[in-house]
Amino acid sequence: MRRRPFARFAGHRRGVSAVEFALVAPCLLLMVMASIDIPRAIAMGRRLGLAASSTADLIARDDTKDLSDVYAAADAIATPYDISGARIVLTAAGVYPVGTGFVARVCSSAARNGQPRAAGTVIGPAPPGTASAGARFVMAEVSMRYAAVFKVFPVLNGWTFSYKAVWPVREGKAVHGSDEVVLAGGSPCPLL
C-alpha cells in the first residue's frame, strides 16, 4: 500500500516551532517598526507646530532685519529633528475693509526653502481677533515632508506636516498710526 507523499509529515512535530515563528515573525517585526516610526512622526509634527508658533511670536516682537536668528530658533526648537530642509514662510500682514467684512493682505514676507508671499496679495479673511480696519498681525507657516525611518509604511513616507501660526503684532514701528512689523526686504503696509 502506497501512502500519500505528505502523509508521512503529519506525524512529525520537530519543525512546528519553526513554522509558527515564521508565521508570527513578520507581524512582530512590523509592530516593532511601527512602534518606532509612528511616535517619531507624531513628535516631529509637534515640534514643527511649536516651531511655527515660536517663530510667529519672535517676529511679532519687532522688525527683524536679519531673520537667520529666527530660523536658527526654529531649528533649535525642533531638536533632535533636523528641519533645515523645512519650508518656513514668515509674513507680516494688514487688515483692510472690503464690503461689509475685512480681508488680510500681505505687507511683507520672507522665506527659507520656499517662496515668500507677494506683497499686496490677499491671504483670506481676517483672522479672529484682528477684524478691524488697520489691524496688523504676523503669520508663520512651516511645512516639511516626513522621512520615515522604515520605508515599509507608505502612509508615513508621503506624510507632509503643515502648520500655520497667526500672532498679533506686539511691538514694532509706528507706521500710519499702527504698530507693525516689516520683514527684511519688505515695506510697511499701505494706507487703508
Image (spheres, rainbow, N blue to C red):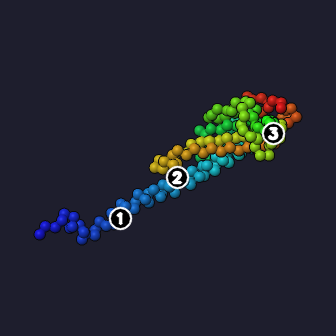
Q: Mark 2 or mark 3, which has the lower sequence index? A: 2
- Look at 83% across and 38% down and name the residue there: 133
Label 2 crowd bin: few (<14), some (14–19), many (20+), radius 10 Å: some
The residue pinned by badge 1 equals 20
On the rendered structure, is 80 left or right of 27?
A: right
Residue 111 in percent (x, y) is at 67, 34
Q: Mark 1 or mark 3, which has the lower sequence index? A: 1
Residue 100's disc is 3
- Look at 37% across and 61% down and name the residue there: 23
Dots 2, 1 in contact, CB < 8 A: no
Front residue of 122 and 154: 122
Residue furthest to the right: 177
Front residue of 129 and 41: 129
As measured in the structure, the alpha-carbon distance from the residue carrying label 2 to the one carrying label 1 is: 26 Å
Residue 192 in percent (x, y) is at 83, 32
- Look at 36% across and 60% down and name the residue there: 22
On the rendered structure, is 148 left or right of 142?
A: left
As measured in the structure, the alpha-carbon distance from the residue carrying label 2 to the one carrying label 3 is: 49 Å
Q: Amino acid at mark 1?
A: Glu
Q: Amino acid at mark 3?
A: Thr
* Vertical comparison of 42 with 171: above or below: below
Q: Amino acid at mark 2?
A: Asp
Q: Mark 2 or mark 1, which has the lower sequence index? A: 1
Dots 1, 3 in contact, CB < 8 A: no
The picture quadrant where one finds residue 11 is bottom left
The residue pinned by badge 2 equals 37
Closest to the camera, between mark 2 and mark 3, is 3
Q: How many marks?
A: 3
Is residue 60 among the parts visible in the rendering?
no
Q: Secondary structure at mark 1?
A: helix
As measured in the structure, the alpha-carbon distance from the residue carrying label 1 to the one carrying label 3 is: 70 Å
The picture quadrant where one finds residue 55 is top right
